[in-house]
Amino acid sequence: QVQLVESGGGLVQAGGSLRLSCEASGRTFSMYAWFRQAPGKEREFVTRIARTGLILAYADAVKGRFTISTDNTRNTVYLQMNSLKPEDTAVYYCAACASYYCNSDPKDYDNWGQGTQVTVSS
């Protein structure tokens, strides 16, 4: 079965760091992405990376603070979050796509993790 399992969320103070993990199983994916959703808001693109590493993109809100990476041997994608701000508070979701077509629209993806809560206090 196709499955994405997320972990690593938690509560941190502003300026702190957190590392999220998403382990994929069931197939080999071509594109991984992270989205987040705050209460009352639509799901928001954070970052994406191709399995080849040749495609990489970040939302302006996280550029310079967040880093996405993959371990293809373990079929795992990571999100290293540094210099966290209260406005980063959200449920973070990993997503995967079988092609390189998938971009920054949540509708591009049909494989999703269950989400992990990230809360940043001031």
Image (cartoon, rainbow, N blue to C red):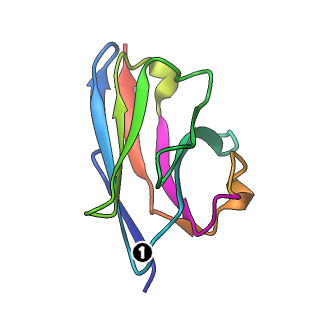
Q: Label 1 amino acid?
A: Gln
The residue that appears at 26% across and 63% down in the rendered structure is 74
Residue 31, compared with residue 99, is above or below; it is above
What SS does tag 1 mark? strand
Residue 60, compared with residue 51, is above or below; it is above
Residue closest to the eye, 61 or 116:
61
Q: Residue furthest bottom?
A: 1
**In the picture, residue 20 is in which quadrant?**
top left
The residue that appears at 53% across and 62% down in the rendered structure is 30
| Viewport quadrant of the C terminus | top left
- Per the rendered image, the range of residues in magenta is 90-101
List x then y, in percent, for residue 5: 35, 65
List x then y, in percent, for residue 61: 59, 21
| Viewport quadrant of the N terminus | bottom left
- The residue to which callout 1 is attached is 3
Q: Is residue 97 visible?
A: yes
